Amino acid sequence: MSRHILPTAMLGILGGGQLGRMFTMSALSMGYRVTVLDPDTESPAGALADVHLCAAYDDPDALQQLVDTCAAVTTEFENVPAESMAFLERHIRVSPSSNSVAIAQDRIREKKFISSSGLKVAPFLAIENLQDFDQALSDHLPGILKIARLGYDGKGQVHVNCREEAKTAFLGLGCKPCVLERKLELQTEISVIVTRTGAAQSVCFPVAENRHAGGILDISIVPARVDNKVAEQARQMALQLAESMDYAGVLAIEFFVLEGGELLINEIAPRPHNSGHYSLNATQVSQFDQQVRTLCGLPPGDTRLLSPAVMVNLLGDIWGDEEPSWDILLSQPNVHLHLYGKKSARVGRKMGHFNVLAEEAGIALKQALELQRRLK
Ligand code: ADP
Ligand code: MG
């Protein structure tokens, strides 16, 4: 293990959205300084960081400044240009690696990598051109055509029932590489967040149970209400995948749980994840603390669950002409509100979230749903 990076070193992060903001808050509270690279002048993380480099992710001067001023650099999203990561890697400590990011940013590579690691994914076909629709598709229909790169929150996905619909969807997505994935009957969805610093230093956060609405994460329930055996298997699969990627950093793994408890890996993210936001209040260290720790070569912190928790996303949909009535949340003694400081609310845009802590997940869920209803 190389030496630790300690406060008051400067840490860099590529991307300054809400994940970058929460990383920045963790790092600042530990006494590190932070430089955010994000072209958005209104970047939520840039507003808090010591330095906001307002430039493109492939801007040579900005990348050089990261090299010159930071002890290490991480990322808040998987769509960083691979060359930028590779450039940084030649000069300073970068985690996760450019190779891990390259796998996670392309659904075709991602699914092939997961399968080659001996782990299961949903049945899929790589679709790179119209001729790829000439093969037998019956095992993959009805299905979801998903754009291989740059899709998120259900964007770049089309539900298709037959070959013709799939072709039309492919044309609609601009004939960009896609995967055609069979639509599965899901019992539920869960996720595991792993922190891996080195071979002997991998830890998992408690398993979250995730409910989506309109392709976007809506609610996470922790601990997930699945069989202990299923939760344990998810943790083992997550650790196995992190190991096979020789991963360094925080890695999120989304699972489909099928009828009977069979687990498939849906997708991975080379960073903290929306379904891990409960860790801001319900575990000893948060996923963002872990990101700081592993970036600095420190051992992962303790991820024990201190309290069952339910996380509810706050999307722009609930903003009218005015701010939502935050007193609904802030008047509750066991509710933690987290807003990202985004200036404009849009439908589907993640503006914040809240965590409800209670002695049982079911009790927290009931209260969370009631508060969610009152906010609408
Ligand atoms: P994103 O990158 O937008 O999160 P996902 O592939 O995770 O893309 O899809 C978003 C959600 O859509 C999933 O969490 C799940 O609820 C649903 N979904 C995706 N693929 C399938 C599938 N093959 N079968 C059933 N539901 C799916
Ligand atoms: Mg997903």
Image: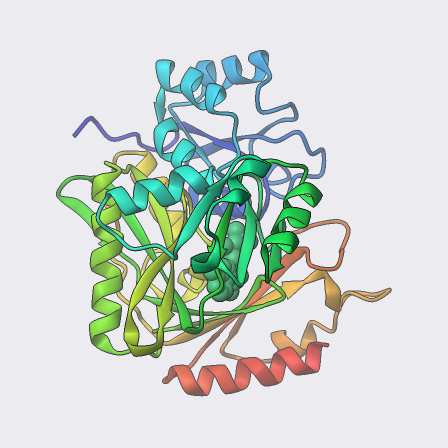
The residue positioned 42% from the left and 86% from the top of the image is 362
Nearest the camera: 73 or 232? Answer: 232
129 horizontally vs 10: left or right: right
> What percent of the width, then of the height, locates residue 295?
33, 35
The residue positioned 47% from the left and 19% from the top of the image is 83
The residue positioned 26% from the left and 56% from the top of the image is 204
Q: Quadrant of residue 11?
A: top left
Q: Quadrant of the C terminus?
A: bottom right
Nearest the camera: 266 or 57? Answer: 266
80 shown above or below 345: above
135 shown above or below 131: below
> What percent of the width, then of the height, locates residue 159?
60, 60
The residue positioned 44% from the left and 47% from the top of the image is 125
> What percent of the width, then of the height, locates residue 364?
46, 82
334 shown above or below 74: below
> What percent of the width, then of the height, locates residue 363?
44, 87
131 horizontally vs 165: left or right: left
- Asked whether residue 112 is in view, the answer is yes
